[in-house]
């Protein structure tokens, strides 16, 4: 998949991550991560056991986040570690060459939580945080180029999994489970080209812009005076190959 290979920037390792933050300030309260080795085409070669860490915050969790995640202020004060310690655990988890990784989350809220990390704890490894940001992949935004909901909006992780025939594992908004399910979605998208093609075709019909397959279809129509469904499918295949 050319678009994904470009997004991976030649990396052959990926770390799927999920962060939870406080309701008001978005301070980190938990992180989960799963790392994988990749083949040259971006498909998963090897999966490793994941990690999860609760993180102390200066901000209160908040009612909404507590209901969503099940994480309480008591959990953080008794089981959480400092932001700097959590970031160090993540750095040790990916190993001695963190620059070899793409760091993948579903949505950009995780990136905002990462940005808050150094503001909360100046002992956090700033170079590693910058490395994550440089090699960050928002998979929700990437997938929206090909798949969207009925209103042409980004779909949730759970709905994306359903679309590709994958059952959600564990509990939503538990960082380790969300990171795991993001890995499953990534794998499913790469291994279900027929589903991706059908969903991309539906997305194109809802688009208000002019994606490459449509532009090529219009060019073909101008050259030949007519086009057919086979032409449309050929241009879609080229776009997702």
Image (cartoon, helix red, strand yellow):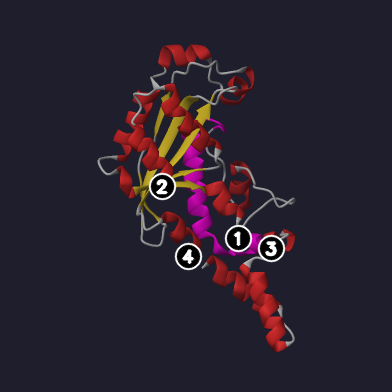
Ranked by sequence position, the earlier of labels 1 and 4 is 4
Q: Residues within 10 Å of mark 3 (few under 14, many from 20)?
A: many
> Mark 2 to mark 4: distance in Å?
18 Å
Mark on residue 195? 1
The residue wearing badge 3 is 204
- For numbered disc 3, what is the local secondary structure? helix
Report the front residue among 167 and 3.
3
Q: Is residue 226 left or right of residue 89?
A: right
Label 2 or label 4, whichever lies nearer to me, is 2
Label 3 or label 1, whichever lies nearer to me, is 3
Label 2 or label 3, whichever lies nearer to me, is 2
Asked whether residue 76 is drawn in magenta, I would say no
Percent coordinates x, y for residue 107 in the rendering = 56, 42
Ranked by sequence position, the earlier of labels 3 and 1 is 1
The residue wearing badge 2 is 135
- For numbered disc 2, what is the local secondary structure? loop
Asked whether residue 176 is drawn in magenta, I would say yes
Ranked by sequence position, the earlier of labels 4 and 3 is 4
Would you say the magenta stretch is mainly helix, strand or loop?
Answer: helix
User: Which region shows up in magenta?
Assistant: 171-200
Kindly check if marks 2 and 3 are in contact, taking CB atoms under 8 A apart as contact: no
Kindly check if marks 4 and 3 are in contact, taking CB atoms under 8 A apart as contact: no
Percent coordinates x, y for residue 19 in the rendering = 49, 32
């Amino acid at each position: 998949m050319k678009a994904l290979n470009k997004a991976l920037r030649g990396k052959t390792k990926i770390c799927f991550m999920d962060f939870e933050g406080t309701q008001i300030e978005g301070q980190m309260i938990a992180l989960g991560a799963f790392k994988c080795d990749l083949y040259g085409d971006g498909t998963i070669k090897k999966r490793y056991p994941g990690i999860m860490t609760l993180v102390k915050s200066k901000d209160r969790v908040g009612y909404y986040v507590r209901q969503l995640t099940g994480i309480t202020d008591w959990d953080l004060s008794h089981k959480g570690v400092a932001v700097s310690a959590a970031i160090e655990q993540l750095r040790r988890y990916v190993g001695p060459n963190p620059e070899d990784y793409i760091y993948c989350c579903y949505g950009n809220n995780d990136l905002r939580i990462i940005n808050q990390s150094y503001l909360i704890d100046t002992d956090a490894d700033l170079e590693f945080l910058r490395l994550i940001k440089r090699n960050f992949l928002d998979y929700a935004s990437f997938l929206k180029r090909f798949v969207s909901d009925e209103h042409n909006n980004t779909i949730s992780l759970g709905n994306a999994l359903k679309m590709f025939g994958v059952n959600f594992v564990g509990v939503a908004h538990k960082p380790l489970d969300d990171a795991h399910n993001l890995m499953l979605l990534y794998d499913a998208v790469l291994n279900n080209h027929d589903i991706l093609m059908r969903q991309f075709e539906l997305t194109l019909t809802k688009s208000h812009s002019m994606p490459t397959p449509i532009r090529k279809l219009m060019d073909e129509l101008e050259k030949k005076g007519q086009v057919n469904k086979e032409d449309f499918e050929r241009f879609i295949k080229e776009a997702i190959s």
